Structure formats: structure tokens, C-alpha cells
Image (cartoon, rainbow, N blue to C red):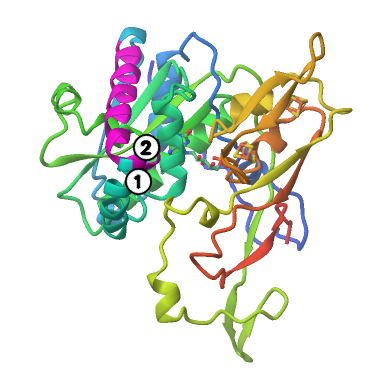
Amino acid sequence: MKDKPIKNAPLSPLYSYEEGMDFNAVERVIMNRRSVRSFKKEPPPDSMIRRVLEAGRFAPSAGNAQPWRFVVVTDPELLEQIERDTQKKTRFLMKFLDYQKSAWRRWLLKPLIKFITRFMPTQLHPIPYNLMRQIAEDKAPVFHGAPAMILLLSDKRGVGTPPLDLGICGQNMVIAAHSLGLGTCWIGMITVTMKMRKWRKFFNVKYPYELSDCLILGWPKRPFDGPVEREAQVVEWFDKAGKRTEDEGREVSNLKFGDRMRIPNYFSESQVSSGQIKFDPELCTGCGVCADICPARGLVMESRAVGKKKLPRLLESAPGVSLCMTCGDCRAACPTGAIQLLRGYNTSYFYKKLSQTPELKPPRRY
Ligand SMILES: Cc1cc2nc3c(=O)[nH]c(=O)nc-3n(C[C@H](O)[C@H](O)[C@H](O)COP(=O)(O)O)c2cc1C
Ligand code: SF4
Ligand code: SF4
């Protein structure tokens, strides 16, 4: 079949913007898209995956270099093998990283890891650390049983910053997929898979290509999409009248030396100030949607008494430290409005939040 040309109908009619007007279809997909972590077994048709890839292919890239390569996996056996190997590798890595298991490990490993964290603050951030611990303890899957996976490889010979191009390209795919009714989730944990020579070789990940990231996709088991509340930025404007700082007149100022030296780490549990949520047991039907979508796998469904309906409970990584990172996804997906976010993930101990408002705000129509 010959490709039909894209009609040149105006996508965004010029000069039609009015303050406070409704979100359009594209904006709605952006605001309502939630990462999906619970899929039906059957994969989406190949044609649909190709259509999603097309959205990626038409992403902007520096110098129009298009520095990407895509690998699609839908073979269930292969997907299972990757899941198993990644779990095994995570368990192995946690042998070195989890200093809490015994007194001698605390004594020996803690100073060493504290030192390494200085050089890998983002990789050894408390959030991926907690997720790796959940995976190592068999409490969380890596690829969430998705029936399809897209590996995004970047070509080092691209222009400027090829990994940035890949991020843009991947997000094009994510938005297109959700607009077509599919669910997706980025899986940064693929870096653990690619630490294994076996898989690098299998997928031919070698110069000039390197792994950028991974997307899983499939038919969501249930509807998960919905808007979340997020922190708002304190935006600085420079206009004709000079500089003004929005949002409660807070000033964005420079971090002091001591603040800059602080990095998020998982050594002192009290430093990992995490999110808090509340469930209304009257409104909750025990459907389990919230536990299915939670990225931290921080919710479990359990009945408080024999014969009673199951209710969600927020897990703690230490007394008073929940596994919640306040993504708001459980609240967005809850069909009965039984969830309330009480406190955002608070990294203020490490970074003074100079550019964000402390409270969470819903998407606003300006
Ligand atoms: C680069 C990147 C890597 C991610 N890696 C993972 C991952 O390994 N596992 C996971 O469950 N979610 C992962 N996520 C999804 C985030 O947890 C999710 O985007 C975040 O909680 C916000 O929720 P939302 O996507 O529903 O808005 C990743 C997201 C991004 C952008
Ligand atoms: S999604 Fe809502 S109704 Fe369902 S178990 Fe969670 S809190 Fe209860
Ligand atoms: S807000 Fe917290 S509990 Fe809810 S899905 Fe996100 S991480 Fe999980």
C-alpha cells in the first residue's frame, strides 16, 4: 500500500490562543500520560509498534544527525531471559552496595560506598538504590512483564549531545504510544542488563553505538492515565520592566559551598525524607490499581483482618522512611479518589529547593 501523504491541515491554528482555554488533544496526552507497569500478555501488533517508532524517527536532533538505532524485542522467552538475568545481576550488585545487611558490612562497606557515591551521585541516588533493593529481594520486577521492549541506542558520532537527541526521540514515541491507547514506561534499569557482556554482544551494542535507554510498551491491563500534581517552578522573567521572580516572590539564589557539597545518599535513612500518602478506607474498594502502578513497588495490598477486603499499605525502607517518591501515579489512577498525597518527596536536606515551590500543584491552564 502506498503511504498516504500527511494532510497539511493546520494543526495549531495560528492566533487562536485565548488565556485559560481548554487543553488540546496533544496537551491532554502530555498531562494525562502515566507510566504503565501492568500489561496484558499479548503484544500490540507490529504495525502499531512501527507507528510508534515512526514518531521517534521524526524527532528533532542536533544537526538533523538522527543519531539513533532501535531494537525491538517481543519474543516472550527472550524477554523473560532478560528479566531473569537483570534480577540476578541486581542481586550481585547489591552484595556490594547494600551495607545494611550485617555489622561488619556496615563497618567495612559504608565508608567505601560513601566515597564512591561522590562520583556516582545520580546512579547511587536513594531512589534507584531502593528500587534495586526491592528487585534483589524479589519484591519488584524490572520490566514489569511488558510484552514489548524498545532499546534506544545512540550513535556517538552524532552532533553535539546524542543522548539528549535520544531522550527527545523516546519521548516522541511515548506520547504517540499513549495517544494510540498503549501504555509505556522508561526503564533506566536496562543499564544493569547492559553491564552483562552477553547482552551487549547479543544486541550488538558496540562502537559507535551505546545504550541510551529502554522503553517497555503494551496494552495496559486497566486504565492508568490521569493528571498528577507536581512541584511548580519559581520562574525568573527578564522583560522590559527588568527582572521579576514569580511564585510568592521567592528569590532564586545561588547555593552555598556547603549546600553544593551535599549529595543525596542512602547512608542515613533519616536523610531520605520520602513521600507520604493517605488512603480513605471508606472510598477504597481494594481494586489494587495503585499497587500495580507504583514505580517504587512501595504499596502492598493486604487485609487488616480475616475476611476483610484488602487495602493498600505504604511500605517503609526504615522506620518512618516510606518507599514513596510522590510521583502521584497511584492517586491519578485510583478510580474512587481514595488517595491523598500528604507530603512530596523532599530532597531539601540535600538541595535547598530554590527553584521549586514546596507544595504540589495540578496542571494549570494559563
Ligand atoms: C530516564 C527514565 C528512567 C526510568 N527508569 C525507570 C525504571 O527503571 N523503572 C520504572 O519502573 N520506572 C522508571 N521510570 C519511570 C519514572 O519512575 C516515572 O516517569 C516517574 O515516576 C514519573 O511518573 P509518570 O511517568 O507516570 O509521570 C523512568 C523514567 C525515566 C524518564
Ligand atoms: S486504587 Fe484506590 S480504590 Fe483501588 S486499592 Fe488503591 S486506593 Fe483502593
Ligand atoms: S505516589 Fe508514592 S505510593 Fe503512590 S505510586 Fe507514587 S511512589 Fe507509589
Q: Residue 38's x, y, as percent?
A: 55, 21
| Residue interval drawn in magenta | 78-103
Residue 92 in sight in this render: yes
Residue 35 sits in quarter: top right
Helix, strand or loop at label 2? It is: loop
Answer yes or no: do the residues labelled 2 and 1 have beta carbons within 8 Å?
A: yes
Q: Residue 157's x, y, as percent?
A: 15, 50
Q: Residue at x 60, y 24 (%)?
A: 292
- Identified by mark 1, the residue type is Arg
Which residue matches tag 2? Answer: 102
Q: Residue 323's x, y, as percent?
A: 57, 40
Residue placed furthest toward the left: 207
Query: In the image, is residue 46 above or below residue 290?
Result: above
What secondary structure predominates along the stretch shown in magenta?
Answer: helix
204 to the left or right of 211? left
The Cα–Cα distance between marks 2 and 1, rounded to whole angstroms, is 6 Å
Residue 329 sits in quarter: top right
Query: In the image, is residue 207 above or below residue 248?
Result: above
- Identified by mark 2, the residue type is Ser
305 to the left or right of 124? right
The mark found on residue 106 in the picture is 1
Q: Is residue 213 magenta?
A: no
Helix, strand or loop at label 1? It is: helix
The CB of the residue at mark 1 lies under 8 Å from ligand 1: no
In the image, 289 versus 41, the foreground residue is: 289
Q: Is residue 91 magenta?
A: yes
Query: In the image, is residue 231 above or below residue 333?
Result: below
